[in-house]
Amino acid sequence: MDIQAVISQLDELSVRMVVGAADAPETLQVLATIEKTARDAGRAPAADVAMELQARATGAAASPEEFERVVTAGIENLRKALEKADPAAPSQPAADAMAYSIAQDPELMSDFVNEAAEHLATIEAQILILERDPTAHDPLHAAFRGFHTIKGLAGFLDLGDIRVVSHEVETLLDRARNQELLLTPAIIDVVLESADYLKRAIACVQAGLPGKPAEAPPYDQLLERVRAVLEGKQAAPPQICEEPVASKSADANKSDGETAFSLRVDAGKLDYMMDMVGELVIAQSLITHNPEIGALESGPLQRNLQQLGRITAEVQRVAMSMRMTPVGTLFGRMNRLVRDLTRKNGKKVRLELAGEETELDKTIIEQLADPMMHMVRNSLDHGLEGPEERAAGGKSPEGTLVLSASHQAGHILIEITDDGRGLNTEKILKKARERGLVPEGQNLSENEIFFLIFEPGFSTAEVVTDVSGRGVGMDVVRRQIQGLRGRIEIRSARGRGTTFLMRLPLTLAIIDGLIVGVGEERYIMPINSVREMLRPTPEMIFTMEGRAEMAMVRGELLPIVRLDRRFAIQGARQNPSEALFVVVEAQGRRFCLLVDEMLGKQEVVIKSLGDTFRHVSGISGGAILADGRVGLILDVNGVLRENANA
């Protein structure tokens, strides 16, 4: 296999990664083949890049999202290395290569700055140990690994100056490991000088993160000293190094006297802190609503309780913000997906992003990657027409796909909008009847027809491609959005396009809920699922076939679900006219939950029910209420499923 064949194989891997058709073992095997072929052909630099990509991909294999991000970004760098190795190979336009270079990913660059700083701190400590004991093996190996890791990361990010210096010092330390070189004080000086240079170069990278150009310091004289040591020559005396470039925050409003820095904290510690903050909120609520304390007519005590409430709320806000990440990191992943798929299917699409600075819990962003990918692929394959079809319909040959995020009523609203052909309700309904999803003669609303596309295995595609058509993507979307306690809506107009709206909570740890009473029990309904509350009249209640209860609400016949019968609760009100209807929506359908009373609205901290009760259908968790009682959090999707199966 020649280099050109390897590049073709790499292009095929790139497409398979984009469409989600390549798993980790297959991808790692392809990278191993590319490395061997490049090395056999005498293209050592390209082989080294392939080897480093294998190492990073292996480390990220446990997380599908991280694995896809690392491999997809690294493929561009590997392709450039292969094309540089083979001048005869056709190269991509420079502007195109730069637009999608891995070095343009600010998240990766920021991670590199933090990781490299840690390695340099370790290197300096280990080299100082070696200065006292040049024969110590463990410090030598640790310093070697630090330079080796920095070299590999810098190679991926096209940081040539850092890579070159790290490589030369790595070679020097490797000779010392193989006992070909004795670490003298002069050599220690050179290694420390190299570490100082890397600190300044990385500080320049950090200064350039907000988008400002940053030029790395020259390293020619340093390389002469390192190579002189490698050749056994007397190195020139070390130069007096200027102070490292100070790291500047992206916030230009900070004064020079203020210092901004980032600190890497284990995610488990953050999760534990969030749990403790939740306990603090519960304890504060119990104290504030304690009847004995409320009966005390003490002005200072009430002021202190108010101050405690303000401090608790601020601590909770800060703790939540520590897990917040701009949604732009998620949107940025879609840019490459759109580029590659449009090249594959021949369509012209312009991707527009809005609200990238909107922040969302990092856990939610990670779990949104798959649903977003499926919906974008669906829009590109099914929604947007080809240039000829768009021109025939009086549209611009270039389609538009818009990803936007915004805050709305305490939630995050993410929209995916295309100006394509829209959903064909007749075609969807016909396909659903053929598959037995909808009985003949049953009438569905337009919204209910739209939601049929989320049924497992449902697809209207005439031809199955490697992008879509198997009917698995949209089912994944609905399942994962529901798992995030979110809600998805569809808006579509024939010939004008389709919009998918995802309403998501800001965090998975806290829920804004409506507290209702049924008998002696208390339940919490997610506020984003509630549409309205009303007290029914006898004229609104109907019985279908002698058993199914329905209610006429604003001209629409809705099923009635009695929570007391659903959860076997004693003492609940049986006459609907003496109770309340809570109209909720799930999976595009509305139904009425019959409850005794509404007790208020409260922001509660979600608690797991443990392994014993976590699979109870219709219940998603529990929470401690202001009076100290435990309330169960309703899963309206589970309640709807149980009602449909009854």
Image (spheres, rainbow, N blue to C red):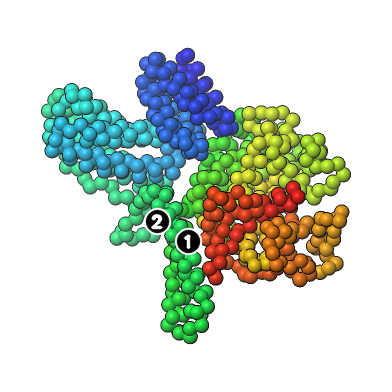
Farthest front residue?
570
The image shows residue 439 at horizontal and vertical percentages of 83, 42
**Left or right, residue 51 beside residue 513:** left
Graded by Cα atoms within 10 Å as few (under 14), some (14 to 19) or many (20 or more), the crowding at tag 1 reads many
Is residue 496 visible in this depiction of the protein? no
Picture quadrant where residue 541 is located: bottom right
Examine the rendering and report whether any part of residue 286 can be seen.
yes
Q: Is residue 609 left or right of residue 42?
A: right
Distance from label 1 to label 2 (Cα)?
31 Å
Tell me which residue sits at (56%, 63%) in the image.
630
| Residue designated by label 2 | 251
State the image coordinates of residue 600 (x, y, percent, origin top left): 62, 70
Say what amino acid the circle numbered 2 marks: Asp
CA neighbours of label 2 inside 10 A, class few (<14), some (14 to 19), many (20+): few
Residue 164: percent from left, percent from top: 30, 31
Look at the numbered discs 1 and 2 and tell me whether their residues touch, using CB distance below 8 Å. Answer: no
Secondary structure of the residue carrying numbered label 1: helix
Looking at the image, which residue is at 50% across and 17% down?
5
Q: Is residue 12 above or below residue 617?
A: above
Say whether residue 115 is left or right of residue 11: left
Residue at x 53% of width, y 68% of height: 628
> Amino acid type of disc 1?
Gly
Nearer the observer, 21 or 577:
577
Give the vertical position of 442 relative to 303 (above or below).
above
Q: Secondary structure at mark 2?
A: loop
Mark 1, mark 2: which one is toward the viewer? 1
1 or 2: tag closer to the N-terminus: 2
Vertical placement of 267 versus 68: above or below?
below
Task: Say the numbered circle drawn on residue 278.
Answer: 1
Quarter location, residue 109: top left
